[in-house]
Amino acid sequence: MRTALRWLGKGIAAAIALALLYQLWIFAHVLWWIDHNPTSTSFMAAGLARQQDKNPDAGLRHQWVPYERISIHLKRAIVAAEDAKFIEHEGFDVEGIQKAVEKNLKKGRLVAGGSTISQQLAKNLFLSGERSFIRKGQEAIITLMIEATWSKR
């Protein structure tokens, strides 16, 4: 019995260590991307995979546009449409989440999300589109990392 408990403890410790290493790997990318554009994102990889299902020779082509070259009107329109409280919150819009939950309960299905721009960015950079509590928890952790290190200029 003691041996089994010891092995269980070692297994749990190893799982925790792996989870922490994964978080550290993500945080290193979050820090790196403060000054560097990612070569690709999970969102881009998912899109490429869909294209390669139809055409195995499909490739990924993109060109990053410097922030300063994006129209101020486009920036404001995106914030207005996606996350009006972007500047005010620290990654999560509790009121927006509550409204989305109420709307979903009223309709009896998922019709609205309460994700902020920061949460959408975390998901699109690192995570799949899978809908699960584990993915949503990971999204929350990455959102906190982004909010703690990146500017909202």
Image (spheres, rainbow, N blue to C red):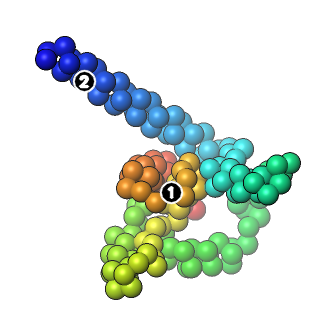
Q: Residue tagged by mark 2?
A: 8
> Is residue 116 visible to the viewer in this orientation of the structure?
yes
Comparing 151 with 21, the one in front is: 21
Badge 2 density bin: few <14, some 14–19, many ≥20, Cα 10 Å: few
Seen at 73% across and 62% down, the residue is 68
In the visual, does 118 lie left or right of 39? left
Q: Secondary structure at mark 2?
A: helix
Residue at the right extreme of this rendering: 57
Badge 1 density bin: few <14, some 14–19, many ≥20, Cα 10 Å: few
Image marks 2 and 1: residues in contact by CB distance under 8 Å: no
Seen at 25% across and 18% down, the residue is 7
Picture quadrant of residue 69: bottom right
Q: Secondary structure at mark 1?
A: loop
In the visual, does 36 lie left or right of 123? right
Seen at 75% across and 54% down, the residue is 53
Whole-percent x, y for residue 55 in the image: 83, 54
Residue at the bottom extreme of this rendering: 106
Residue at the top extreme of this rendering: 3
Residue 2 drawn above or below residue 75: above
Q: Residue tagged by mark 1?
A: 130
Disc number for residue 19: none
Q: Amino acid type of disc 2?
A: Leu
User: What is the quadrant of the C terminus in the image?
Assistant: bottom right
Comparing 39 with 131, the one in front is: 131
Whole-percent x, y for residue 36 in the image: 68, 44
Whole-percent x, y for residue 10 in the image: 28, 20
Comparing 83 with 57, the one in front is: 57
User: What is the quadrant of the N terminus in the image?
Assistant: top left
In the visual, does 36 lie left or right of 100? right
> Is residue 150 visible to the viewer in this orientation of the structure?
no
